[in-house]
Amino acid sequence: MRQKLAVFLDHSGLLVAGTVIALAWANVARESYERFAHALHFAVNDIGMAFFFALAAKEVVEATAPGGALHSPRRSAVPLIAAVGGMAGPAAIYAVLVQALDRPELMRGWAIPVATDIAFSYLVARVIFGARHPGIPFLLLLAIADDALGLLILAVFYPTGELRLAAFAIVLSVALTLAWWLRRRGTLSFWPYIIGAGTISWLAFYWGGVHPALALVPITPLMPRAARDAGLFVESSSRDTLNAFEHWWKIPVQGMLFFFGLVNAGVEVTSVGAGTWIVLVAILLGKPIGIVSCTALSVAAGLRRPAGVTWRDLTVLGVVAAIGFTVALFFATAAFPPGELLDQTKMGALLSFSAAILAVTAAFLLRVGRMADAQPV
C-alpha cells in the first residue's frame, strides 16, 4: 500500500485529483469556484510554484554537473537537439495556425504547446517500453532539457508586469551574494538558502516584473551538492544540501500541485474554442515531428542515435513527450489574463493528456516496446 501511494505521489496523482475536482466544481458552481480560485491564485502560482520550479532546476543542475547525464557532449548532444526540435515544432505549428485562422490575439500563447510534463511522460513511457528500455533515459534527458529551456522562455517572454531590470539585477545580486556566502562558510542546511537568499530573490523577481515562480531557480545551483546524482526518479542516499532540499520538499510540492490543479484547471467544458484546438494540434503534431526530424538531422550531421532506440521508438517517444499538462497549464496562465482566451488554451493544455492514448495506439500500430508482440484485434 505504501509503495502504491509513493507511485501515486511521484507521478503527480494529487495534481490529477485537483484537476478533476476543479473541472467538476467549475461546471457545477462556476461563481463559487472563481471566487475560490481568485483568492488562492497568487499564493499558489506566484509563491507555491516556486518550489516546483526549484525541483525542476535541481534536476537540470544535477544533469549538467560533472558526471551528470547532460555533462558529456556525446551523451547530451542528440537529446538536447531533439528537445529544441520538440519545442520549435509546436511553436511553429501554433504560429502558423494562428495566422491561418486569423486569430492574432492568440499569438501570445505560442509557448503553451512547447512544454513536456516530465512526470506523466516518464510514467507513460515506462508503461509502453518498460523500465529498462534505452528510450527511457533518452526521454528523460530530452525532458530535462525541455524544462531548462522552458524556464528561460518563462523568464524572458512572460513578465508579470513592467520590467524593471535595474532593480531586478541589484536585488538579485544581493540574493546570490548571500547564497554564495552561505555556501562558502559551509552552511549545509537548505533553510538559510530558502528563507534568506530565496526570499530576497523572490522580491527581486516580483519587483523586477519577472515571474516570481522562478525565484528559487538561480538559488538552487548555489546549494552544496554531491559530486554525482543518482538520477531522476531514483531515490538517492546522498545527504548533501541539494538532495536534502529535494527530499524534504518532494511531498509538500505534490500537495502544492494539488492546489495548482484546483486553482487553475477549473474551466467549463463549453470553453472549447479555437485556442483549444490550436494548442492541441500544435503539441500533438509538433512534438513528434520536431523530435524525430531534429534527431534525423543530428544523425545526418554525424552524431549517433541512442543505442537500442529505433526510429519507430523515437516516433512513439515524440508522441509521449506531447503530454504538456502541468507546465503547459502554467504557461497558459502566464500568457493570458482571466477570460475566454485563457479558458480555451487551458482546455488545450489539459487535453494534451490525450497524447498518452495516442502514444499507446502508436506503439501498438508500430509494434514497439511491450506492444511488439501484441496481436491486432
Image: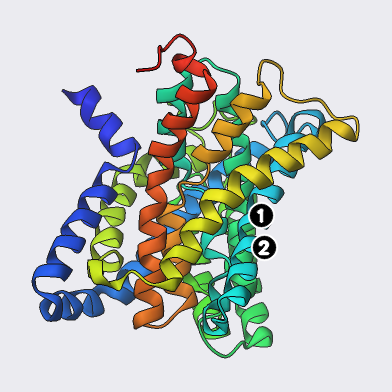
For image coordinates 41% across by 79% down, the residue present is: 341
Front-most of 278 and 187?
278
Q: Quadrant of residue 138?
A: top right
User: Would residue 169 be found to the left or right of residue 133 on screen?
Assistant: right
Total tally of numbered discs in the picture: 2
Residue 124 quadrant:
top left
- Which quarter of the rendering shows the N terminus? top left
Q: Which residue is identified by label 1?
A: 89
Residue for badge 2: 92
349 vs 176, left or right, is left
Q: Decide: few, some or many residues near mark 2? Use Cα within 10 Å; few <14, some 14-19, many ≥20.
A: some
In the image, is residue 39 above or below residue 250?
below
Q: Mark 2 belongs to which amino acid?
A: Ala
Residue 179, image x, y percentages:
59, 59
**Under tag 2, what secondary structure?**
helix
Q: Position of residue 265 (x, y in %)?
A: 29, 64
Nearer the observer, 255 or 270: 270
